[in-house]
Image (cartoon, rainbow, N blue to C red):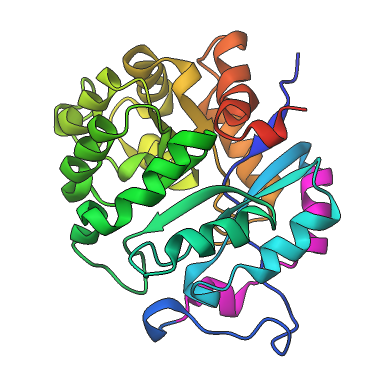
Amino acid sequence: MTPEIIDIHPHIISTDTVRYPIAPQHGHRSNWSATRPVTFEQMIAEMDEAGVAKAAIVHSSTTYGHNNAYVADSVAQYPKRFTGVYSFDLLAPDALETFDYWLKHGMGGIRLFTGGATHQSDGSWLLNPATFPIWARCAEIGMTMVVQTTPEGLSMVAELAERFPSVKIALDHCARPDLSEGPPYANCAALFDFAKYDNVYLKITPRTFDLAQAAPGGADAFFPHLVKVFGADHLAFGSNYPASAGPLKKLIDQGHACFASLSEEERAWVWGRTAKVLYPALAG
């Protein structure tokens, strides 16, 4: 039986730079957004071809900074199929007002972007108390926080998970685990320790697929181990497309190959059920 597939990490880029001006965070545009952009309409076509039912579209901070308008306008067209994961300045004095504005415009989750290919910070602002009112607001309404960080930032995420136990936290790219030594993945001890937090979830992306397939034991060893540690109900698929080169169907096929050693029930959770927990707007 083919499970319902929900993608919780695609990106879209508009060709209309007047309506949606390019203004990347920290002034450096991501290479993928400039060289292989995918519009909302193209994303829908690729989702249909790949068998992806729904998606939580992640705003591209390395293209638009804190202007979530393109994702918001796109989600508004098909609110039953899409929700948006937005980014904004949690340290700004008007952060709560900004939160309420984007909440009215399709925001189903918030992404805390500490850096990527274009910029990397130590992420220390994650623990700035000025951001805590946004976390409290997420706790009130059941909104998921997505955190992109490296293994070095996991201790900060742990502190947030303890401080806000009712806020679901999804870690982008499984926090980029070190799988080089193979099973039992001793270098992932800090990551696996997050299994004790019921509010922490891992996002499995093609970057995770590539790491697992290249590691000793391959994907058939790693993903069952990850399920054993966290439970399939705390793992969710995200394509990272087109930041991860597509087409989308190729990435879905890679996922099917990587999850081949999981049970049908486990695959159903990773492909779609966990996504509905993280983004209730996609559960209908």
User: Could you tell me which quadrant the N terminus lies in?
Assistant: top right
Question: Percent from the top left, x then y, of residue 203?
Answer: 46, 37
Q: Position of residue 274 (x, y in %)?
A: 56, 25
At 54% from the left and 66% from the top, the residue drawn is 60
Describe residue 230's horizontal placement relative to residue 163 as left or right.
right
Quadrant hosting residue 51: top right
Is 38 on the left-hand or right-hand side of 187? right
Toward the viewer: 14 or 204? Answer: 14
- Looking at this view, is 182 or 149 the one in front? 149
Q: Residue 176's quadrant in the figure?
A: top left
Above or below for 221 versus 135:
above
Secondary structure character of the magenta stretch overall: helix
Identity of the residue drawn at 46% across and 59% down = 96
Report the side of 214 relative to 59 (left or right).
left
Q: Is residue 56 above or below residue 243?
A: above
Q: Which residues fall within the magenta stretch?
A: 29-49
- Residue 131 to residue 197: above or below: below
Query: x and y percent of residue 46 in the render?
Result: 78, 52
44 is within the stretch colored magenta? yes
Task: Please identify the quadrant where the C terminus is shown.
Answer: top right
Q: Residue at x 18, y 62 (%)?
A: 122
